Amino acid sequence: MFKWLLVVGVVYLVYKYFIQKPTLNGSSKTDNKENLQSNDMVQCDECHIFVSIDEAILSNGKYYCSKECLEKKR
């Protein structure tokens, strides 16, 4: 019986470590920020315009369109 529990535990750990993608905040639920690709648009937290994820500035889990908007929030 102990051997089966050990095998199940090892399989679970391998799944958690290699297969399930870790999130930024440590939870297992999927978040829109994790699934962004280079051509996706995100909304600036300050002025609410949309900007490409490649051009956006990420700070404290929020996206900003420019350094000016980032500085306004600080």
Image (tube, rainbow, N blue to C red):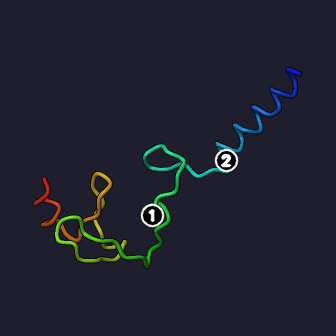
- Callout 2 environment at 10 Å: few (<14), some (14 to 19), or many (20+)? few
Residue type at tag 2:
Phe
The residue wearing badge 2 is 18
The residue wearing badge 1 is 32
SS at circle 1: loop
SS at circle 2: helix
Residue at 37% over, 76% down? 41
Residue at 72% over, 38% down? 12
Q: How many discs appear? A: 2
The picture places residue 47, in percent across and down from the top left corner, at 17, 71
Q: Earlier in the sequence, mark 1 or mark 2?
A: 2
Q: Quadrant of residue 6?
A: top right
Q: Is residue 53 above or below residue 71?
A: below
Looking at the rendered structure, which numbered label has been put on residue 48?
none
The picture places residue 13, in percent across and down from the top left corner, at 69, 37
Q: Is residue 27 left or right of residue 14?
A: left
Residue at 12% over, 59% down? 71
Distance between mark 1 and mark 2 Cα atoms: 21 Å
- Callout 1 environment at 10 Å: few (<14), some (14 to 19), or many (20+)? few
Q: Is residue 60 above or below residue 48?
A: above
Residue type at tag 1:
Asn
Instruction: Please identify, in this view, whether the residue under mark 1 or under mark 2 is nearer the observer.
Output: 1
Q: Is residue 31 left or right of residue 71?
A: right
Q: Is residue 64 above or below residue 38?
A: above
The picture places residue 24, in percent across and down from the top left corner, at 44, 49
The picture places residue 46, in percent across and down from the top left corner, at 17, 66
Q: Quadrant of residue 73?
A: bottom left
Q: Is residue 33 left or right of residue 17?
A: left
Q: Quadrant of residue 4?
A: top right
Residue at 46% over, 68% down? 36
Q: Is residue 30 above or below residue 47?
A: above
Where's the N terminus, which quadrant?
Answer: top right
